[in-house]
Image (tube, rainbow, N blue to C red):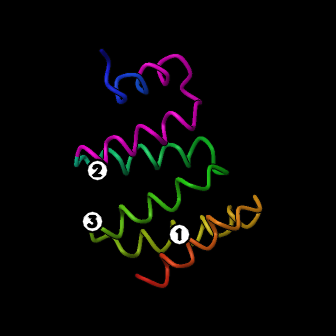
Amino acid sequence: MKTRKEMLEEFLAEDPSDSFSRYALALELEKEGRDPDAISTLEKVIELDAGYVAAYYHLGRLLARTGRTDDARAVYSRGLIEASEAGEQRTQSEIQEAIEML
């Protein structure tokens, strides 16, 4: 039986533009303690789909946790703009709270 991570990797092989699968893969990598891989995967989500607002929150959180506070602040700031433009008020408030915690 395949793991969730393996299934997500297959989905991405079939459709590299699948933002949800790439985002979910990043969360699986984080669960495995592979923060650098999770960070680069989330960066790729944003690069390919700037409007995928949940990625900004998780990327900012990972960057902050790994000591990259300035990078986290920049990601959060961009995420606030994207969330606002998308009308994603919940994500916007989560990002705002994260910024205040930095």
Badge 3 density bin: few <14, some 14–19, many ≥20, Cα 10 Å:
few
What is the span of residues highlighted in magenta in the rendered image? 10-32
Q: Which residue is mark 1?
A: 76
Q: Earlier in the sequence, mark 2 or mark 1?
A: 2
Q: Which mark is residue 58?
A: none
- Asked whether, in this view, residue 92 is left or right of residue 76, the answer is right
Badge 2 density bin: few <14, some 14–19, many ≥20, Cα 10 Å:
some
* Residue found at the far left of this picture: 33
**Residue 7 x %, y %:** 41, 22
Q: Earlier in the sequence, mark 2 or mark 3?
A: 2
Q: Amino acid at mark 2?
A: Pro
Q: Earlier in the sequence, mark 1 or mark 3?
A: 3
Residue at figure coordinates x 57%, y 37% from the top left: 19
Per the image, is 16 magenta? yes
**Residue 4 x %, y %:** 37, 28
Principal SS element in the magenta part? Answer: helix
Question: Compared with residue 73, is residue 33 higher up or lower down, i.e. above or below?
Answer: above
For the N terminus, the image quarter is top left
Q: Is 49 in front, or is 90?
A: 90
* Residue found at the far bottom of this picture: 100
Q: Which residue is mark 3?
A: 66
Q: CA distance from mark 1 to mark 3?
A: 15 Å
Q: Quadrant of residue 83?
A: bottom right
Q: Which residue is mark 2?
A: 36
Residue at figure coordinates x 43%, y 19% from the top left: 10
Q: Secondary structure at mark 3?
A: loop
